[in-house]
Amino acid sequence: MTGAPPIVFLDANVLFSMALGGPVFELVLELGDGPVRLITSARCKAEAELNLERKHPESSPRLAEVLARVEVLPWSGEPDPSAIGLVGEGDAHVLGAALGLGAAVLMTGDVRDFGSLMERDDLGIKVRTPRKFLLEGPPA
């Protein structure tokens, strides 16, 4: 008997990049069809949609295809207190949602704001770029 697949929480910038395409992001989506469960929050989804509309509106239809393969969960609107202090207040909702869902991995391309968490092993979650996630392989 096997357990539920590990959760990989996707930050808005990863959704944005998935809409633009590329082999790394295709591989991540393929893993979501099997060994991992890809999840994001409604707030991350809205942020990705807004940024795409501003910067690459031609890719908005592709984001809809990506989101058909990713679970989008509601967001409470409040920053998670457990995340404040680890990241800035503007990113606390991302880390807080990932922690609250029991995600094994928070996937983000935001090295500036999340970089200090990428080498830590005391958080109960791995914070990884898409490339680093693929190099390590999905969590067991």
Image (cartoon, grey):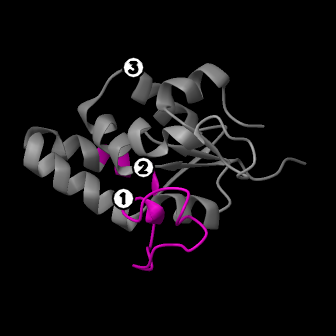
User: How many other residues sit within 10 Å of disc 2, few (<14), some (14-19) or many (≥20)?
Assistant: many
Left or right relative to 61: residue 133: right
Magenta run includes residue 75: yes
Residue topped by disc 2: 11
Q: Nearer the viewer, residue 92 or 56?
A: 92
Q: Residue at x 50, y 24 (%)?
A: 131
Magenta run includes residue 124: no
Residue topped by disc 1: 44
Helix, strand or loop under label 3: helix
Q: Earlier in the sequence, mark 3 or mark 1?
A: 3
Q: Residue at x 56, y 74 (%)?
A: 81
Cβ–Cβ below 8 Å for labels 1 and 2? Answer: yes
Residue type, label 1: Cys
Residue type, label 3: Pro
Left or right relative to 20: residue 104: right
Q: How far apart are labels 3 and 1 at the CA level?
A: 22 Å
Look at the image and tell me whether residue 72 can be seen.
no
Residue topped by disc 3: 23
> In the picture shown, does residue 102 fall above or below 105?
below
Q: How far apart are labels 1 and 2 at the CA level?
A: 6 Å
Left or right relative to 107: residue 89: left
Q: Residue at x 41, y 29 (%)?
A: 25
Q: How far apart are labels 3 and 2 at the CA level?
A: 18 Å
Q: Residue at x 69, y 47 (%)?
A: 6
> In the picture shown, does residue 105 fall above or below 101?
above
